[in-house]
Image: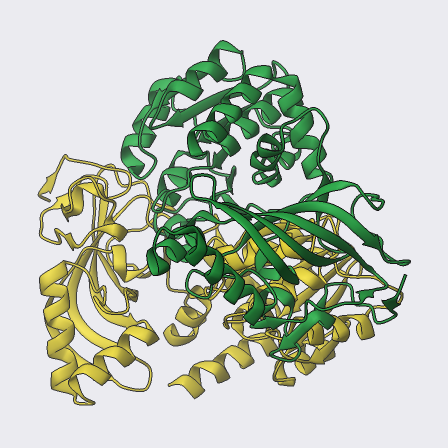
Chain colours: A yellow, B green
Amino acid sequence: MEYRQLTHPYGANRVREPEGALPQAARRLDASGPLHADEVAIEVERLNIDSASFHQIVEEVGRREDAVARRIREIVDDRGKMENPVTGSGGMLSGTVGAVGPSYDGPVEVVVGDDVATLVSLTLTPLSLSQIRGVDFDSHHVAVDGRAYLPSSAPLAPMPADFDPQLALAIFDVCGAPTRLPELVDDVSSALILGAGRSGMLCAAAAREATPGSIELYGLDRDPSNLEMLSREGVLDDYRTGDATDPMGTLEQVQVMMPGDERPELVVNTCNVEQSEMASILTCRPGGTVYFFNMATDFNRAALGAEGVGQDVELVIGNGYAEGHATFALELVRQYPVLRERIERHVASSA
Amino acid sequence: MEYRQLTHPYGANRVREPEGALPQAARRLDASGPLHADEVAIEVERLNIDSASFHQIVEEVGRREDAVARRIREIVDDRGKMENPVTGSGGMLSGTVGAVGPSYDGPVEVVVGDDVATLVSLTLTPLSLSQIRGVDFDSHHVAVDGRAYLPSSAPLAPMPADFDPQLALAIFDVCGAPTRLPELVDDVSSALILGAGRSGMLCAAAAREATPGSIELYGLDRDPSNLEMLSREGVLDDYRTGDATDPMGTLEQVQVMMPGDERPELVVNTCNVEQSEMASILTCRPGGTVYFFNMATDFNRAALGAEGVGQDVELVIGNGYAEGHATFALELVRQYPVLRERIERHVASSA
């Protein structure tokens, strides 16, 4: 196997421009062979285009398969990665391991032929395409023949045998969220989960698993259906239907759920909406922690918002990566069949 | 003393529009009397207009005292607060306590006549002006006759007798930063402070005070002068001149300072520049903590950046408020006369 000795922990030697940048910040990556010694090569079969990016492309070129395929091809040929120049977003990819460099030292052991998914954004993954086989307008999945190169630092995961690939990808997409919960609920007597989508459900289940019986767990979402299920399963102690963009309304809901003037010591914000910072901050007990796993969070709104109401709480940015996150999330779903069913339903409704 | 019984912990009853908003998010506040039962009234003597806001106003109306005064008056009359509609930023105010409501229960005890400064943004402080006495184009200070109403939840601080008001305000402005350091350095053997301006110097001193001798403290800034001082004083063990917007360059500097393949367990980002997220994330030891006290931090860049390089680190948003923060920061400056001198120099150079 031919490969280059040149190695770099973060794939910076794949950056073409600007010089000195890391792959995510780069305008253009070098996605050409051969393999570097510390990389893994993936024979790419499918791109899961980020929703914002997919919609922008369809808006730009029209809802025609050939036109969308051409635009994706143009972007990848130009940039060496599938980063939409308008939205700045990417997506993920899946395929099989094509080659493993001799000094590759990734997060999981892989051998040639393994089915894998990358758990990093396409915005930093060196990618070349030889063919686009089809575009699915519902799932935003694009069947391709292509090749990607990942450095050892880039998280990836083997596809589990007992999950449909679509389901596995839907779990991988948010697997960073629940993995930190066991640490966050340690020594905490109560927690509130805002949002009961995929990440909210996984976070609630992770909190309950980590501290069975010893924590009071509350939930709030606009839609009660997942909350009802979590409550029936004994994951949540109580829940309310409410709007996390309304801080005072959310605080009132919490006061109804928690007796006395108690507030949760941990608030987990998984709502994918803007303007939910203040509801998270206000409902948290002074000295507690607010964990934002919500990409619509505004740093300044959180920092200044807490200051404005004199709330001494720790504000944590949800890191998309945590060691063993993919395995952790899959295992959680195995333990809660209803969670699996809900996420399958989510996949089906978005497909 | 006449006052209204109507009370509200976060001053939401001072919001005129939109209904249900908290003061910061409001377009218009009610800054009229009388005092509410849980408020303190401040006879305002000086507004310290936020730098971005001040420059925008000067650009809009020209560098003429009467024109700037008129524009400030217009904004406050229209909005009931000094929130620049273009920049969205405010500033702080100082004055004397004019009245204290019977159920006021603020962060510090105050009596009528006390000199105080508010430690929350003018963007959420109900304010009316009867006169503008003068505008200082260098310091962005505006001498006024006005009145502000603060709810119990809004942080404020008495002006210390042993500090010039300008110096005290310059410390109050960043006092949230160092207050969390003692907790963050607990059980940590090494820390890196990025940026050596006011917050960086205060954070370094707070870390050293909390763990005398038992922690290795490193610094990095574009300008070495404050770093040299901190090193001479025994606060920093080592430092380098460098650019935190260059992640790989910063990592190399850290590798030179720390022997073996060690990295700091805590990275404190106090650089007030964009694009310094990755330098903070890359230089942190896996399992460590990155504390962002930097308003130019982008939530998504931090969350996705850490994921992209597979860095399992805790990412913390610096909260502008912490219990006792003003007192803590003043005490720190009293303990380090050179720190006082440097901040005085900063005040003089920006005045």
Name the one closer to the observer, B271 or B156: B156
Residue B262 rendering spot, x and y as whole percentages = 43, 24
- Kindly tell me whether residue A203 is visible in this rendering: no
Name the one closer to the observer, B40 or A185: B40
Residue B296 rendering spot, x and y as whole percentages = 42, 49
- Kindly tell me whether residue A124 is visible in this rendering: yes
Question: Residue visible at 44% across and 24% down?
Answer: B219
Name the image quarter holding residue A60.
bottom left
Tell me if residue B118 comes above or below residue A285 in the rendering. Answer: above
Tell me if residue B145 comes above or below residue B179 in the rendering. Answer: below
Tell me if residue B159 comes above or below residue A54 in the rendering. Answer: above
Residue A313 rendering spot, x and y as whole percentages = 67, 50
Quarter the C terminus of chain B occupies: top left
Quarter the N terminus of chain B occupies: bottom right
Q: Using residue B170 as the reference point, say whether residue A116 is left or right of it.
A: left
Name the image quarter holding residue B28.
bottom right
Name the image quarter holding residue B39.
bottom right
Residue A151 rendering spot, x and y as whole percentages = 26, 45
Question: Residue visible at 10% across and 70% down?
Answer: A74
Name the one closer to the observer, B36 or A237: B36
Q: How many marks?
A: 0
Q: Using residue A332 as the reference point, say whether residue A130 is left or right of it.
A: left
Question: Residue visible at 39% across and 44% down?
Answer: B277
